[in-house]
């Protein structure tokens, strides 16, 4: 009988602790479940028929930056947001992240259509859909319209260049990973020639393509950070060179690096304007193929997780972009 009473007391104590834990979880102020990725519908006319997802850290105050992160082919918003490290950094730095997602009806490989004339012009197609997502997020989160950034991998990188060119007034900066310069498919005559060979254009011709996307716009223009695998055979490294040529010309500076050093052992260059501001930065990731550089771990400069097209090279591209943009 004594053993039975002792067992009953243990069960009662266990039940009491469970109930107390549940009460603490649901009734204590500020103890709500952690933020999660949410889909947003009705964000505009959505002419590009894209889906909008977003991540907003719990308790995010008004006036915080917004990062738009565009996935690569065969990826989706959730996988890219987590794998690239942007969701991890959103919590660390206090920013919200908009994650557009392609639909198979638009592109069978889930690539953003960075090469289609109807999707890369201001006010049209996928570019207009992404711009509408930005407007919705700024309104819902009371975000800082002067600190909106756009980034993407591969086809998402190509679409990031589109957004910088077609909507330059909306973005303070961009970050392109294994992507393409704006108008590259049209300059090369084919997206595949652009990817595998590159397009023959002078810096001014590249810059003119950006200026033509937003006629009459006099600036300020977004700054740019580029990451490229030196062993990438899907998007050849010449595309990083052409992105540098394009955006240095847009900013009215030359194509001679003002800084040439290494970061995490990889070649890094900085191109400054006449006022000394860094307007283009490039990272050539030696030995890396096609994908987003990540550096999984809990260190202050680490972020992301390894996976398909998410390559652990001990350098997290998202972290480096955010630092260049003054986010952390």
Image: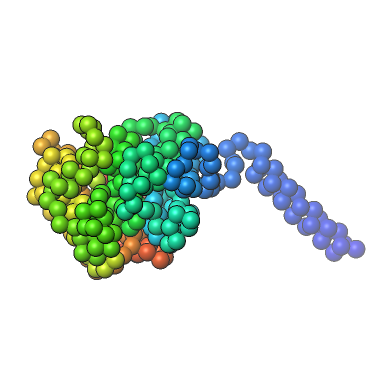
Establish if 141 lies above or below 3: above
Near-viewer residue (152 or 218): 218
Residue 94 x, y percent position in the rendering = 42, 40
Residue 57 x, y percent position in the rendering = 48, 42
Near-viewer residue (106 or 296): 106
Q: Is residue 88 visible?
A: no
Residue 225 x, y percent position in the rendering = 25, 49
Residue at 36% across, 47% down: 119
On the rendered structure, is 23 left or right of 114? right
Residue 114 x, y percent position in the rendering = 33, 52
Residue at 36% across, 32% down: 145
Give the quarter of the figure containing the N terminus.
Answer: bottom right
Give the quarter of the figure containing the C terminus.
Answer: top left
Establish if 262 lies above or below 274: below
On the rendered structure, is 320 left or right of 43? left
Q: Is residue 246 visible?
A: yes
């Amino acid at each position: 009988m004594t053993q039975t009473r002792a067992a009953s007391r243990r069960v009662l104590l266990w039940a009491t602790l469970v109930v107390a834990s549940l009460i603490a979880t649901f009734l204590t102020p500020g103890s709500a479940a952690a933020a999660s990725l949410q889909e947003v519908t009705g964000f505009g006319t959505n002419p590009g028929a894209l889906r909008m997802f977003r991540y907003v850290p719990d308790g995010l105050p008004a006036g915080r930056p917004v990062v738009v992160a565009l996935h690569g082919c065969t990826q989706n918003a959730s996988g890219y947001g987590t794998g690239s490290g942007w969701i991890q950094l959103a919590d660390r730095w206090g920013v919200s992240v908009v994650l557009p997602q392609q639909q198979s009806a638009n592109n069978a490989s889930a690539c953003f259509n960075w090469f289609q004339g109807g999707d890369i012009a201001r006010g049209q197609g996928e570019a207009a859909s992404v711009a509408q997502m930005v407007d919705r997020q700024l309104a819902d989160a009371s975000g800082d319209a002067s600190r909106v950034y756009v980034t993407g991998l591969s086809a998402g990188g190509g679409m990031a260049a589109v957004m910088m060119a077609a909507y330059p007034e909306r973005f303070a900066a961009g970050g392109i990973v294994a992507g393409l310069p704006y108008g590259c498919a049209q300059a090369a005559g084919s997206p595949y020639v652009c990817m595998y060979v590159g397009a023959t254009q002078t810096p001014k011709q590249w810059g003119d393509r950006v200026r033509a996307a937003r006629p009459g716009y006099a600036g300020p223009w977004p700054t740019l950070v580029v990451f490229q695998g030196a062993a990438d055979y899907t998007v050849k490294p010449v595309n990083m060179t052409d992105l540098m040529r394009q955006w240095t010309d847009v900013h009215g500076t030359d194509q001679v690096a003002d800084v040439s050093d290494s970061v995490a052992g990889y070649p890094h260059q900085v191109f400054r304007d006449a006022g000394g501001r860094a307007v283009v930065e490039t990272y050539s990731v030696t030995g890396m193929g096609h994908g987003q550089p990540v550096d999984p771990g809990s260190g202050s400069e680490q972020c992301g997780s390894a996976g398909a097209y998410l390559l652990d090279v001990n350098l997290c591209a998202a972290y480096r972009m955010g630092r260049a943009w003054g986010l952390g």
